Amino acid sequence: MHGGRALVVGGGIGGLTAAATLRAVGWDVTVLEQARALAQVGAGIQVASNAARVFAGLGLADALAVRAVEPTGIDVRSARTGRLLHHTPLGDFARTTYGAPYFHLHRADLLDVLVGAVPAEAIRLRTVVTAVQDRGDAVTVTLDDGTTLDADVVVAADGIHSPSRALLHGPARSQFSGMVCWRGLIPAERVAHLALARICHVWYGPDASVVAYWVRGGELFNVVGIVQGGAEAVESWSARGDRDRLLADFAGFEPTVRGFMAEIDDPFLWAIHDRDPLPWWTRGRVTLLGDAAHPMLPYMAQGACQAIEDAAVLARCLEPVDPSRTDEVTAALQRYEAIRRPRTTEVQQQSRAGATVFHLKDWRSVWRRNQQLRTAMRADPAVSARTWLYGYDADRAVDEHDDGAIAAAAATTVSTSGAAAVADHWSRPVSGR
C-alpha cells in the first residue's frame, strides 16, 4: 500500500533519518528545518551497532564506513593513574555479536550522508512551525509566514527545546545537569607522539571524565571532557571556552590526557541539559522523536542512536497503514510509542546513572566500582550488559511486539529502579575496607 504524506519537523540526525526510513516504506516526506543551512558544529559522534544496523538497512553503511573509524574496543581507565579498569571489545566482535559495525564519525560527515539520502526538494530550510492542528482526518501545520501545510502524520524531531513538544505538552524548561562539557578536535599529526590507539578512550575521575576517539578516517582526534560544577557555560554547541580553564579542569588527569588537552587551541564549552521522561509522546496523528521525546545525558553515547532507532521503528509501524483511515494511523503511532518509550526511558535513566558512576570521588565507592569493572572484564563479553543496548534490532522489536501490550505500555512509565540502583550501589560508602 502506498504511504501517505508526512511532515518531519527538524532536520537534524533524527529528523533526516526519519525522512529516509519513511521514504523507504513509501511515504511522501517533507522535512521542515528552521535553520538557514543544514550543518553540524565540529564534533564527533558514536554510531553504535544498534544505530549502524538501521543505516545498513537504508543502504548507507558503505557511505558511512569510508568516512568513519571503526574502533576495536572501549578502554576505561583511571583518570589519575591511567590503569585499565575495563575493556569492551568492538571491531569484528561487534559485527559478529551485535550484527552491525560500531562507528566513530564526525557529525558533519554523518549529516552529509543523511542529506544525500533525502531529495533536496524534500528539505525546506528557514521554515518555522508555529502551530500544529490535528483535524482528525489530517494534520495542519502553520508556518511563521502564515502559510499552512497538510499531512497525514507530523513527526516532531526538533530537539531538546522542541517547540512542537511544547505545543503538545505545554512550555517547560530543560534541566541543567550541573555539568559542563568541553569539546575539541585535534589534527592527527599534533597527537602522533601520544600513540593513541583506534579505540574509544575513556577516563573516570573524581568530578570529571574524558571520552576521546578518532574520526574522519583517523585525520582528527575528537575529545569530550565533562566536569561537574565546572565553569559557567551556555547550552550551545557553538559557544567557545577559555583554553586556560580547560587545562585547569583536567590538570589532575594522567599525562596522556593532559598531553592531548594541551593541543586543543579553540575549545567549545557546552552546558549539559536533559529532561525527565515524558508520560506520552503521541496525540492523534502527531508524535515525537529523538531529543524532542527523550533527551539524555551523554554517558552512554546513545542520544543520536536512540533517535535513529525511533526512526526505524516508526517507519515499520506506519508501513502497512492506510493514511486515510484515522484509526489505522493513530494505532500505528501508539504502537510506535509503546515499543520505543520503555527502551528510551531506560536508556535515559541509565545515562543519568552514568553521571554518578563516571565521577565518583569517595575512595571506598571508587574501589567498589573499579573492582566490579575488572570482574566484568574477565567475564564473557558476549553476554555483557551491553548486548541489550548494542544488539537492539528495530525490525525484530516491531515483529515481536505484542499488540496487547500497547495499552499497558502507554499507561505505565517504565520502572527505573534498576538504573538508579546502579548509581546507588557504586556511590554507597563501604565500611570495613
Image: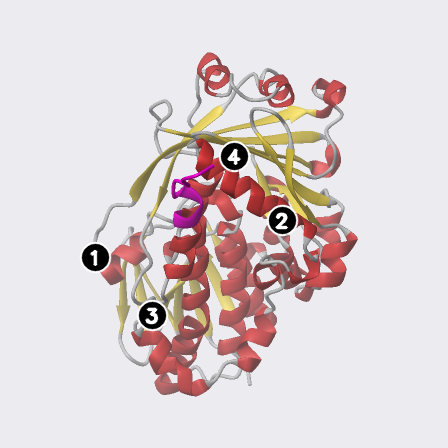
- Residue range highlighted in magenta: 424-433
Q: How far apart in space, not on screen, are marks 4 and 1 (Cα)?
A: 29 Å
- Residue bearing the label numbered 3: 282
- Residue bearing the label numbered 1: 170
Q: Is residue 421 above or below residue 366?
A: below
Spot occupied by residue 76 in the image (x, y as percentages of width and height): 61, 38
Spot occupied by residue 49 in the image (x, y as percentages of width and height): 65, 57
Q: For residue 375, which numbered disc appears in the image?
A: 2
Residue 359 in view? no
Query: Amino acid under label 3?
Result: Thr
Query: Amino acid under label 1?
Result: Gly
Q: Quick check: marks 1 and 3 in contact, CB under 8 Å? A: no
Query: Can residue 426 be found in the magenta stretch?
Result: yes
Query: Amino acid under label 2?
Result: Thr
Q: What is the basis of the colouring in this image?
A: secondary structure
The secondary structure making up most of the magenta span is loop
Q: How far apart in space, not on screen, are marks 4 and 2 (Cα)?
A: 39 Å
- Residue bearing the label numbered 4: 41
Characterize the local packing of mark 2: few (<14), some (14-19) or many (20 or more) Cα atoms within 10 angstroms.
few
Which one is in front, 349 or 271?
349
